[in-house]
Amino acid sequence: MEFTINRLKLSKILNLVSPLITPLDFKSITDSIYMEVSNEILNIKVVGEEVIVKASLPVEAPDLKFLTNAQKLIHLVTKSNTDNIVFTLTGSNIEEGIGNVKIKGNSTITLPLKNLHTFPDSIDFESIVYTKVDDDNFLDDVIICSNFTDKTAQNFKSGISVSKTNMVALSSNSGMFIIKKLPLKKDFTAKPNSFKILNNLSDLVIGISEEPKFAVFNGNMDDIMVYVAITIFNENYPYQEYISKAKKWKSEPHYSLEFNKNDFIGVLSRLDGIVSTMNPIVTIEINKNKATFSYNFQEYESKETISCACEDTFTIKMDIKRMKEMSNLCLETLSIFISKESPVVLMAEGARLYCGNIIKE
């Protein structure tokens, strides 16, 4: 059996899925690529550790399906500059992996087939009920939240919680709460890296697959239809508890403080050269329109004063990482709120609320 695919379109799909491929040289399903032609539609499927991708495009070919090595196929196709890639299948039982596939671009390679039964049962993407993600900031907010997940955690804190009304991410010392309306029937939590592939797609819609449990997105990559299924955490994210805490902190009596962003970043850049990871705590003394940043650890010392806008006098201590988080969230001015009752610093930017731990004096 032989069929031909436009190289540019195939390359777009392979470039999309290549980050999911593991270099195990055909020893794992995550180094395999599934290709199926049905009714002159080519479906390409790849299973990653947290994500499943299915991409479809029209092709003139008989019905067929096979499984082969992903890395070597991707290498040949993406390094070729021919108009088309030709696939030729031979073997006594292709579905059971008895045979091979010859792939011709500028050069020709022959790859062994793999038993199709080793490829996991896929999601029935077409049967899922989808609703449009009518939010231009959805993926931007995912990127912001990804900075606040605890990458070392073995529970929900390593993921981003997405619900009908908000997006939440927490690390051990800070958190991001984004108020937004999303077309979800059920909440879900997923690891931030799982969302990265969605940046290549437009016209996103979302649905939830129950068995197996995935958050499923459908979108377009030029004229190629792509489904992306993201693994969902089994345990629930107790986001309501944390949102209640954030609302409480926001309503508490607080100090208001404003910095020019460039001045604030300038102090950080100079502190960054001497602050030790063994002691990343910086003291900030606020005296109305002046803020003095000081650091003293072993033989390292630094002290610098910049202008600020404040009506109070107080002192706090803050991890330099919290300060960097705040500087990344604002446009020109850092508008900071420091609770008088809780050891918390807050920043509100529209629908986004940042909370970070501090040390009070």
Image (cartoon, rainbow, N blue to C red):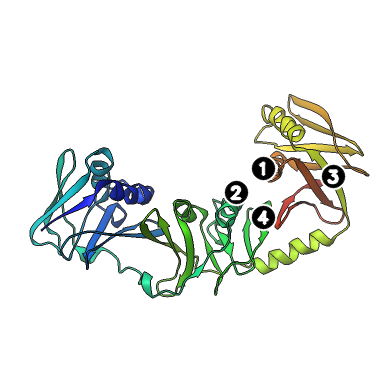
The amino acid type found where label 1 is placed reads: Asn
* Dot label at residue 147: 2
Quadrant containing the C terminus is top right
Indicate the quadrant where residue 41 lies: bottom left
Task: Say what secondary structure mark 4 lies in.
Answer: strand
The amino acid type found where label 3 is placed reads: Leu
> What residue is at 67 percent from the left and 69 percent from the top?
240
Contact between labelled residues 2 and 3, with CB atoms less than 8 Å apart = no
* Dot label at residue 176: 4
Q: Relative to 327, does residue 91 appear above or below in the rendering?
A: below
Q: Tag 2: Cα neighbours inside 10 Å, few (<14), some, or many (≥20)? A: some
Contact between labelled residues 4 and 2, with CB atoms less than 8 Å apart = yes
| Residue at image mark 3 | 257
> What residue is at 38 percent from the left and 75 percent from the top?
127
| Residue at image mark 1 | 328
Task: Say what secondary structure mark 3 lies in.
Answer: strand
**Sequence-wise, which precedes: disc 3 or disc 2?**
2
Q: Relative to 281, does residue 114 appear above or below in the rendering?
A: below
Front position among marks 1 and 4: 1
Front position among marks 3 and 2: 3
Gap between marks 2 and 4 measured at Cα: 9 Å
Q: Could you tell me residue 111's position as x and y percent?
A: 16, 49
